[in-house]
């Protein structure tokens, strides 16, 4: 799937692009059917709150789910990645962030590039996120929120903040966010399951806890340009990919052919 010039212009100006219903209900059903199995696995790639055991997310799902391995190479994500990043790309991170009904998980304001730069030695903000909603996302179940245009400021000041269970996140202070919001406001792309949002690695973003009875699962594929590979791969592979080989798209029907049918859990 190729993005139009207008879509690329919108992405360059706003720092994000929202694509309602990029994936069909049938495709989302195939992905969602995998979630109970994935979240029941006791592997280091599955992140749980140490006290409440609340699941926060699953990382590197392509290693233990053939269905998600197909999504990782889906042409509706990878072809736009090639267009926007202008090069071959590899997978820096692949994760499901889950917000369970009435769950506590939130994310303070941050730019992803700040953490990738500081932790992983990523030279430039030439990686970005291709996110797919696995559930309907509304104003109550913890949607992601952006400051449009904030990516044009480049990397801004941030401080490493320790959050339960994950490597410290480089978060932005209230003053920086207030200045950006004063200029550009806040938007929150919401929509039905199957919708996608692609966003720049310097996009300032956040998300609040889920105050609703509805789950909110979003998959994030982070693609990095192969020539922008990370220089200090010190974190585990599931936080920062150590395999810099380019990835290429599968056929468009890769989620509906049955080829992804699950192998037994490892
Ligand atoms: O899914 C979310 O609520 C936000 C996730 C996020 O910002 C991140 O993983 O960097």
Image: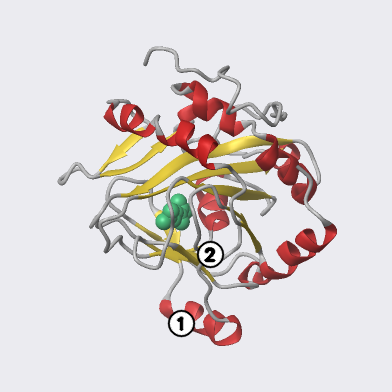
Q: Which residue is mark 2?
A: 189
Where residue 246 appears, as percent x and y from the top left, is 71, 29
Figure quadrant of residue 138: bottom left
Figure quadrant of residue 42: top left
Where residue 204 appears, as percent x and y from the top left, is 54, 67
Secondary structure of the residue carrying tag 1 is helix
Query: What's the CA distance linking mark 1 and mark 2?
Result: 24 Å
Where residue 257 appears, as percent x and y from the top left, is 60, 21
Q: Is residue 188 visible?
A: yes
Please report the residue visible at 74 percent of the width from the left and 64 percent of the height from the top: 12
Nearer the observer: mark 1 or 2; the answer is: 2
Q: Is residue 38 left or right of residue 203?
A: left
Q: Which residue is mark 1?
A: 175
User: Is 101 situated above or below 158?
Assistant: above
Camera-side residue of 230 and 174:
174
Please report the residue visible at 48 percent of the width from the left and 83 percent of the height from the top: 178
> Label 2: how many residues lie within 10 Å, few (<14), some (14-19) or many (20+)?
some
> Label 1: how many residues lie within 10 Å, few (<14), some (14-19) or many (20+)?
few
Q: Is mark 1 within 8 Å of ligand 1?
A: no
Please report the residue visible at 81 percent of the width from the left and 46 percent of the height from the top: 86
């Amino acid at each position: 799937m190729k993005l139009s010039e207008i879509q690329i212009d919108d992405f360059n100006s706003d720092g994000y692009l929202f694509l309602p219903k990029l994936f069909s209900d049938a495709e989302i059903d195939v992905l969602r059917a995998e979630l109970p199995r994935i979240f029941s696995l006791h592997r280091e790639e599955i992140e749980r709150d140490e006290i409440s055991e609340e699941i926060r997310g699953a990382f590197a799902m392509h290693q233990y789910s053939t269905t998600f391995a197909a999504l990782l190479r889906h042409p509706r994500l990878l072809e736009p990645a090639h267009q926007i990043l202008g090069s071959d790309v590899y997978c820096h991170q692949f994760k499901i962030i889950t917000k369970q009904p009435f769950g506590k998980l939130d994310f303070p304001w941050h730019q992803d590039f700040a953490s990738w730069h500081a932790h992983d030695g990523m030279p430039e903000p030439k990686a970005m996120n291709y996110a797919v909603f696995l559930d309907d996302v509304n104003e109550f179940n913890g949607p992601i929120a952006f400051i449009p245009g904030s990516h044009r400021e480049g990397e801004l000041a941030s401080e490493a903040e320790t959050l339960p269970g994950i490597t410290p996140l480089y978060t932005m202070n209230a003053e920086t966010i207030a200045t950006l919001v004063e200029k550009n406001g806040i938007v929150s792309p919401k929509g039905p399951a199957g919708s996608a949002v692609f966003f720049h690695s310097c996009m300032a973003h956040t998300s609040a806890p889920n105050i609703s009875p509805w789950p909110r699962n979003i998959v994030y594929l982070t693609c990095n340009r192969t020539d922008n590979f990370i220089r200090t791969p010190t974190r585990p592979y599931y936080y920062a990919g150590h395999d810099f080989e380019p990835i290429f798209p599968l056929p468009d029907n890769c989620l509906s052919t049955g080829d992804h049918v699950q192998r037994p859990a490892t």
